[in-house]
Image (cartoon, grey):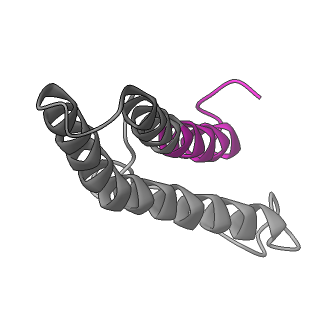
Amino acid sequence: MAHLTPSTRLVELRPGGPDDPDAMRAASILAAYFAAGQAQALRRVLWPPAAAAAGLALLLALTTFLHRTTLVMVLLGCAAVLIGTAVFEWRAERRLRTLLGRGEP
């Protein structure tokens, strides 16, 4: 998945110009840009603890200190966090690319 960062994209917005008289396109692009940034930050914050929790749960399960059902629930919860944040980020980036005219609608 390609991640959008401020250093990889340069976009010139001209709100109020002939192609954007009410500045709604510029506002939509800025909102999508910030949403993509927030989604990326959320992923960066949540993935390390989720991976650590999954690893710790696996380690405890190997020592028979953790019941299998609990292990499965912890792993499912971690997978839900990882998949949910990845999908959230993917959708935010796709919306930004679409608004910039670089992606499918």
Whole-percent x, y for residue 101 in the image: 65, 36
Say whether residue 46 is left or right of residue 25: left
Q: Is residue 104 magenta?
A: yes
Q: Is residue 6 magenta?
A: no
Which residue does the image show at 54% across and 67% down from the upper left?
Answer: 34
| Magenta extent | 84-105
Residue 27 x %, y %: 72, 70
Of the pair 78 and 17, the residue shown nearer to us: 78
User: Where is 69 relative to 38, above or below?
Assistant: above
Q: Is residue 19 above or below residue 71?
A: below
Image quarter in which the N terminus is found: top left
Magenta part, dominant SS: helix
Residue 103 visible:
yes
Vertical placement of residue 52 versus 34, above or below: above
Give the camera-side residue of 79 and 88.
79
Query: Residue 95 lies in what quarter of the image?
Result: top right
Q: Residue at x 60, y 47 (%)?
A: 92
Q: Position of residue 26 (x, y in %)?
A: 70, 66
**Image side of residue 41 versus residue 90, left or right:** left
